[in-house]
Image (cartoon, rainbow, N blue to C red):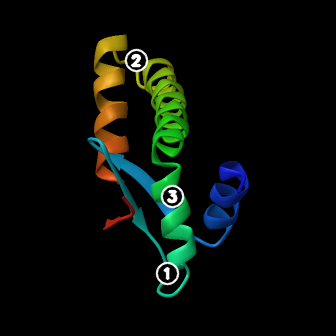
Amino acid sequence: MNIHVLLDRLNRSGVRLHIDGDRLRWFAPVGIVTEADLAALREHKVEVLTILRDEENDRVEERASILQFDAYFSRQEAERRALDEQHSTNGGDAA
C-alpha cells in the first residue's frame, strides 16, 4: 500500500492525524477509520510520523512568518506562538 494514497484518502474523509511525542493520534468521524487503515498506519508508523513532522514544521514555519510580518512579533516570539497554536489544535490513538 502506498502510504501517501492512504493519508490522502483519510484526509479527504475528515481524518486528522497528529503526533504526540512518539505516538500517532487521530480524530475522525465515527466509522471512517477501518481496522485495515489502523493496521497500515501501524505498519508504516515511522514513515507516517516523518511525513507529519515535515508537514507540521512547514505549517509552523509559515505561521511564524505571518505572525512576524503581520503582528510585528520578534522571530522568537512568532515561532513560540505558532508552536502553541499548532499544539492546541492537536485525539484517538492510531499506533
Q: Look at discs 2 and 3 and give the one toward the viewer.
A: 3
Give the answer, above or below, for where 86 lies relative to 10.
Answer: above
Q: CA distance from mark 2 to mark 3?
A: 40 Å
Q: Which numbered disc, 1 or 3, marks the residue closer to the eye?
A: 3
Q: Which x, y percent locates residue 64?
A: 44, 25
At x 70%, y 57%, the residue is 1
Q: Tell me which corner region of the image, top left, top right, bottom left or bottom right, holds residue 81.
A: top left
Q: Quadrant of the C terminus?
A: bottom left
Q: Position of residue 18 (x, y in %)?
A: 41, 51
Secondary element at tag 1 = loop
| Residue occupying image coordinates x 69% and y 65% | 9
Q: Nearer the viewer, mark 1 or mark 2?
A: 1
| Residue 83 appears in the rendering | yes
Crowdedness near tag 1: few (<14), some (14–19) or many (≥20) residues, C-alpha within 10 Å: few
Give left or right: position of 23 versus 68. Answer: left
What residue is shown with label 3?
Answer: 41
| Circle 3 SS class | helix
In this picture, residue 27 sits left or right of residue 10:
left
Give the spatial CA distance, label 1 vs label 3: 17 Å
Indicate which disc, 2 or 3, sits on the residue closer to the N terminus.
3
Along the viewing direction, whichever of 39 and 93 lies nearer the viewer: 39
Residue assigned mark 1? 29
Q: Quarter of the image holding residue 72? A: top left
